[in-house]
């Protein structure tokens, strides 16, 4: 478990150093070998996480060690409950994806445009969720309402949340989400061509992506 603690803090620091989240925003969690969770503490900065102070939960969901967890635990819990492949969850406040969430959505169930094959490969379809107050348990209810059909959601005016098979996979996917959002903003109003549905389907089939 020491290795997992170190990995979470290294990944968080990398995200922070590259401006993908800021201040004390963002939270990350991962399943432990015994079925519990390690979670970043409330009010903590991704740039200064202490491996020894990460919040630890047992397999029954009881907080058993470390600092108090992020207030966004309902979000994390909902992904673990509904996606059997979820071994890590990361939530950030990156500028481009938040900015894109402020614009009118073409399709809330498929919010992120498929501008590159990698967006499809890493994320499948991304669901846009409405505005919630930070820490509102209703965010978890909204994720549960998707019944595991999405590995990534975008909280409008707030930030993306992504589940992955490992901490590295979750972080890679949320970085792809932010990069795609940046491309969408850079080309907004310029008639940019997204991948056609046939190409999206081919990518999904080749890389075993569930488009929900």
Image: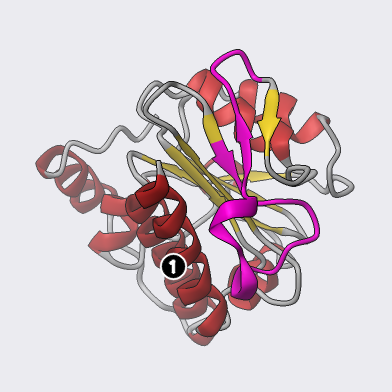
Q: Is residue 156 highlighted in magenta?
A: no
Q: Report the residue at 54% width, 32% height from top.
A: 37
Residue positioned most to the top = 60
Name the quarter where the C terminus is drawn: top left
Q: Is residue 116 above or below residue 31?
A: below
Name the quarter where the N terminus is drawn: top left
Residue 173: x %, y % from top left: 38, 56
Q: Residues within 10 Å of mark 1 (few under 14, many from 20)?
A: some
First to last magenta residue range: 38-61
Q: Is residue 204 visible?
A: yes
Q: Report the residue at 55% width, 40% height from top.
A: 38
Q: Is residue 39 highlighted in magenta?
A: yes
Q: Look at mark 1 in the image and give the residue it sits on.
A: 10
Residue 150: x %, y % from top left: 47, 34
Residue 65: x %, y % from top left: 67, 35
Q: Tell me which corner region of the image, top left, top right, bottom left or bottom right, holds residue 146.
A: top right
Q: Is residue 147 visible?
A: no
């Amino acid at each position: 478990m020491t290795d997992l603690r170190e990995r979470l803090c290294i990944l968080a620091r990398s995200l922070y150093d590259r401006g993908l989240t800021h201040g004390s925003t963002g939270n990350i969690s991962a399943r432990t070998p015994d079925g519990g969770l390690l979670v970043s503490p409330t009010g903590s900065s991704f740039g200064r996480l202490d491996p020894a102070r990460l919040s630890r939960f047992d397999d029954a969901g009881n907080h058993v060690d470390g600092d108090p967890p992020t207030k966004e635990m309902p979000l994390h819990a909902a992904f673990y409950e509904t996606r059997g492949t979820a071994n890590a969850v990361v939530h950030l406040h990156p500028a481009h994806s938040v900015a894109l969430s402020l614009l009118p959505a073409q399709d809330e169930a498929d919010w992120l445009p498929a501008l590159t094959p990698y967006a499809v490969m890493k994320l499948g379809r991304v669901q846009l969720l409405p505005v919630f107050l930070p820490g509102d348990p209703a965010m978890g209810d909204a994720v549960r309402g998707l019944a595991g059909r999405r590995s990534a959601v975008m909280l409008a005016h707030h930030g993306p949340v992504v589940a992955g098979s490992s901490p590295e996979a979750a972080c890679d996917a949320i970085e792809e989400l932010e990069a795609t959002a940046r491309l969408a903003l850079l080309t907004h109003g310029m008639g940019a061509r997204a991948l056609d549905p046939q190409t999206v389907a081919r990518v999904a089939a080749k890389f075993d992506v569930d488009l929900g």
